[in-house]
Every structure is written in structure tokens, then in C-alpha cells.
Amino acid sequence: MPIAVYILGLTVFCIGTTEFMISGLLPDLARDLSVSIPTVGLLISGYALGVVVGGPVLTVATLRINRKTSLVGLLLLFVLGQTMGALASGYGVLMTGRVIAALAQGAFFGIGSVVAVDLAGPQRRGQALAIMFAGLTVANVFGVPAGTFLSQHAGWRASFWVVDALAVLALLGVTFLVPRRPNGPYVGVRAEFAAFRNPRVWVALATSMLTQAAIFCCFSYLSPLFTDVSGFPEGAVPLLLVLFGIGCFAGSIVGGKFADRYLLPNLYVGIGAMALVLALLTLTAHSRTATVVTIAVFGVAAFSINPALQAQVMREAGDAPTLATTTTNTSAFNVGNTIGPWLGGSVISAGLGYTAPAWAGALLAVAGLLTAAVSGMLHRQATRASQTSGGANVLASSRAS
């Protein structure tokens, strides 16, 4: 496997750590910036909104630009935003830096996926994508807990600076180790948007959005739940986040194994399990032992559906270009990442306590399960219509003969 693919994986690790690590920094940021924890939670929503806007816009804007040049430019944008966050003197500057960094994510994931597959060759497409996006899993297993640990011992700015340094290293790697190859034929903006005429694509994107909202509604506020409800000391929070990350890693393996052969059952079981686990968390959070078990299972359920969500959009989009199959699904994920923390912060601000985001997340997961069921129904109808049409065409041809 070309080393450039691993460089892309390092970049995804940096981006994923930046996106997720705020959940472990909530208490420190709230104290230092003199704002409430729900207000700090909006930093997650602001980042997600930047991905939603930046992904499709920058992907379309860079269609005619060489992919390596685009990757370098996007990484420069990410480093700029991350540096602004590390130097932020107040909440407003920190939010601005988060949004600027986020603008690069959606387009980088889409363009980087194409580059990784091109470098590895069609026979190793899955392996290349697995290596690249393993950066997200490693971000959950190692990056987020490490950021929390650094914040507790050296301040939250140290977490930002370490990620910034790794992002600069990734930028140098992309600049010097990713070869410059010609882009494929330019298909035009109209072809990029052709897939969105299919209503099944929108239902699949809605499923991605709702399930991610369910995850981040609860995940964004796990730190205060651990300390204020479960009674864990602050020093235990990084270890609990590691446990969640290990669950995510296990869920990714399980989901990747079954997504191709059992796409819809994977979605039904995974989303249903997540709704149940989130509902149970409101009860188990009062026991340390039960919390440990529930958080691990939450990680498994949350990430077991990700491969199937991506495969579902790709299946419904058919042969559509990257905008529909990769970048827009990333945006759908981050619409959910915008709604989830906002909703979780709203129920906390309403005085419902730190277990309330788990209840709200469970309801969002139920909504995602319903859209997944609708998606399955529409796909079956389309398959039957295609088979009927195909049979009619064969019969007409035989009569003509």
C-alpha cells in the first residue's frame, strides 16, 4: 500500500480528533471561557455546520483543480482554523476557528477517498478506504481521550496545539509524498447533482442525519454525566472515553463485515440497539459498573451502522459522482452532528439534567429506524418495478421476433 494512503489516514485522524474532542474538554472550556456547558456544546454543532456547508461547496468549487492541489489547500484551511482555536482569546474566536477548520473536512474526505483508491488501484479499493478512514476510529480510541488527558493536565489549548502540530506534519506528507496525477474527465456540475432527483437518496441521507444526531446528542455531554451523575472523578473520564472508543472500533469491524451482505438488517439491528442502549443509559448512569458496560455497548451500536449508512447512500445514488456518494453523506452526518449537541444542550438548559440527552438521543434513533424502514420499502418497490419492466421488455422482444 502506498505510504501516501497512510498519510491520508493521519490527516483523517487529525480531523476526527478535532471534531470529537470537544466532548472531553467541556468542563475545562466552560470554566476558562466563563460560559455554560450547553454553550460549549454548541462548538460541536458549529463545527458540524461548517462541514455541512463546506463539503458540497468546496467539492464543486474544486472540480477542475488537480486533486493534490485541492488536498493541500484544504489542509492549509484546516491548520488555519485549528491555530485560531488554539490562540482564541474568547468564545467567539474559538467558534470562528472551529468553523474555518470544519470547512475543509467534507471536501477532504470526498477528494481524499478518490485519491486513495486511485493510488491503491481498483483491486485494493476497500483496503485503501479502510486504512484512510481508520483514522476516525483511532481518533475515538486514542485521540479524544488523549485530548481530554492533556486538557486536564496542561490546559485545553495544549490539546489544540498537539492536533495542530500533527496536521502540519500531515500537510508536509501530502505535499511531498502524495503524487500529482491527472483528474478524471470533467463531468460538469449538472452530472454531480443528477443523483439528487432520486427520492431514495434523500431518505438514505435522512437516516444518516438522524442516527448521527442521536449519537452526538448524548456523546457530546458524556463528561458531565460521568462526573455529576455516575460519580466518577474527572481523572476517570479519559479512560471511559477510551472504553467508548474501543466499542466504536469493535462496532466498525462488525458493521464492515455484515454491511455488504446484510445492509438493511445491519441498519435495523444497529439503530434499534442504539435506541435501546440510550434509553437504558438514563437508568444505568446512576451506577458506575452499569455505566461502564452501557458506554461500551453504546460505542459498538453507534459505529456498527456507519459502513451500512455509507453503503446505503452509494447504492441509491448508483454511479453518481463523489458529491452524492461521499461528500453529501458526510454533510448529512454533520447535519446530525449539528442538531444533536444543540438538542442535548437544550434539554439540559431546560433543567432536565445530564441524563436527558440520552432520552432525546433515543427518540432520534427511533426516528432514524423509521426512515431506514421507509428506505428499505422504497428500495424493494424499485427492485420489483425494475424486474417487472425487464420481464416486459424480454416478452416484447420475443413477440417481435
Image (cartoon, rainbow, N blue to C red):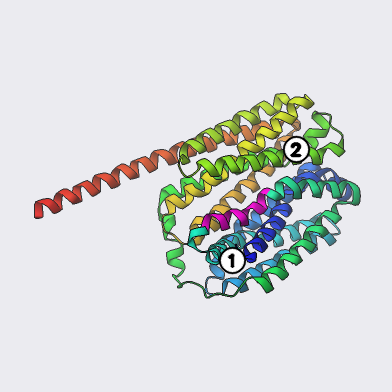
Residue that extends furthest to the front in the rendered view of this protein: 1
Q: Residue at x 72, y 70 (%)?
A: 172
* Dot 1 or dot 2, earlier in sequence: 1
| Residue receiving disc 1 | 58
Q: Is residue 241 visible?
A: yes
| Secondary structure under the numbered disc 1 in the rendered image | helix
Lateral position of residue 248 relative to residue 239, left or right: left
Residue that extends furthest to the right in the rendered view of this protein: 153
Extent of the magenta region: 125-137
Quarter assignment of residue 387: top left
Type of the residue with mark 2: Leu
| Residue receiving disc 2 | 222
- Where residue 393 appears, as percent x and y from the top left, is 19, 51
Q: Residue at x 53, y 70 (%)?
A: 63
| Secondary structure under the numbered disc 2 in the rendered image | helix
| Magenta-drawn stretch contains 136 | yes
Residue 296: which disc? none
Please name the predominant secondary structure of the magenta segment in the image. Answer: helix
Q: Rate crowding at label 1 as few (under 14), some (14 to 19) or many (20 or more) other CA atoms within 10 Å.
A: some
Quarter assignment of residue 249: top right
Residue closest to the eye, 54 or 6: 6
How many numbered circles are shown? 2
Q: Is residue 261 above or below residue 83?
A: above
Type of the residue with mark 1: Leu
Lateral position of residue 161 relative to residue 314, left or right: right
Q: Quadrant of the C terminus?
A: bottom left
Quarter assignment of residue 233: top right
Q: Is residue 76 visible?
A: no
